[in-house]
Amino acid sequence: MCYPQGAHPPEVPSDLLPPIIGGSGGKELTLVSADGTKFRAYLAGAGEGDAGVVIAPDVRGLHPFYEELADRFASAGVHAIAFDYFGRTAGAERRADSFDYMPHVRQTTPTIVFADIAASRTELGKETKARRVFVLGFCFGGRIAFLSSAEQPGLAGVVGFYGRLGKRENEVWPTPAEQAPRMRAAVLGLFGGADPSIPPSDVATFETALTAAKVKHHLETYPGAPHSFFDRTFGEHKKECDDAWRRVLAFMRTGDPARTS
């Protein structure tokens, strides 16, 4: 599990919030993918501004954590939509924390997930003024965010929080390094230095691949931070979480993944 029950996203640092917070408030949606599948999403409009983000959750799908995160982005001036992966196998209804997600994760494929991202992007553009759209994800969704740079045309950028870079046996998902030659959108990667699932060698391989492919990028590793530092132990890692917020919002404002302000 990437975070315990009852976890909340870290607050946006107060100096990054606009003086007047606009927006229409968050709302639940049922969207339809290219194959006719209905899936659940949550959209939070930010009022003015042209930056938007599609949030790819971790393995639990559209958990309330990600709805709250969408609201956090809207409060910071970024239109946001978070979507669920499991419309085809678990339906479009809200699920309890006891939901057994792994059988559904195993049934996801790149084709269907990227189709759902495309539908989410379309809805974000219809409902808000977002014209520069990013994909941001966590863990399972972090790798999806990285791969979106290759699979989703016209993105302003992608952000992966501790997206796994290696490959397990019989896995259908390619590694981000394998897809680097096809990537077009700028990449920001945020990793925990004490995350055993993403060793430094994997980060180095991804860095080398992005550099060789001439993809604009920045990969930041926080020494001593665990996997899911942003959504599980942010109280213990406030400095890292504040820095992550600064990097993400600066990227979404400027298009430069190396910016911190």
Image: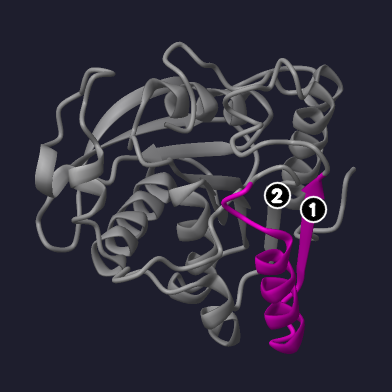
Q: Are marks 1 and 2 in contact (CB under 8 Å)?
A: yes
Residue at the spot of label 1: 220
168 displayed left or right of 80: left
- Residue 104 is situated, as x and y percent measured from the top left of the image, at 19, 46
Magenta span of residues: 196-222
Residue 110 visible, this angle: yes
Identify the residue at horizontal 36%, vertical 56% (top origin): 117
Figure check: 254 above or below 110: above
Sort mark 1 into few (<14), some (14-19) or many (20+) by Cα contacts within 10 Å: some
Question: Toward which corner of the image does residue 239 lie, by quadrant?
Answer: top right
Residue at the spot of label 2: 190
Quadrant in the picture for the C terminus? top right
Question: Toward which corner of the image does residue 63 lie, by quadrant?
Answer: top left
User: What SS does tag 1 mark?
Assistant: strand
Magenta stretch contains residue 109: no
Q: How many marks?
A: 2
- Residue 111 is situated, as x and y percent measured from the top left of the image, at 26, 69
- Residue 68 is situated, as x and y percent measured from the top left of the image, at 49, 21
Magenta stretch contains residue 207: yes
68 displayed left or right of 261: left
Which one is earlier in the sequence, the residue at label 1 or at label 2?
2
Q: Separation of disc 1 and disc 2 at Cα? A: 5 Å
- Residue 156 is situated, as x and y percent measured from the top left of the image, at 62, 62
User: What SS does tag 2 mark?
Assistant: strand
Quadrant in the picture for the N terminus? top left
Name the one closer to the observer, 231 or 130: 231
Looking at the picture, which amino acid does disc 2 mark?
Leu
The numbered mark at residue 183 is none
Name the one closer to the observer, 55 or 125: 55
Identify the residue at horizontal 68%, vertical 22% (top origin): 234
Sort mark 2 into few (<14), some (14-19) or many (20+) by Cα contacts within 10 Å: many
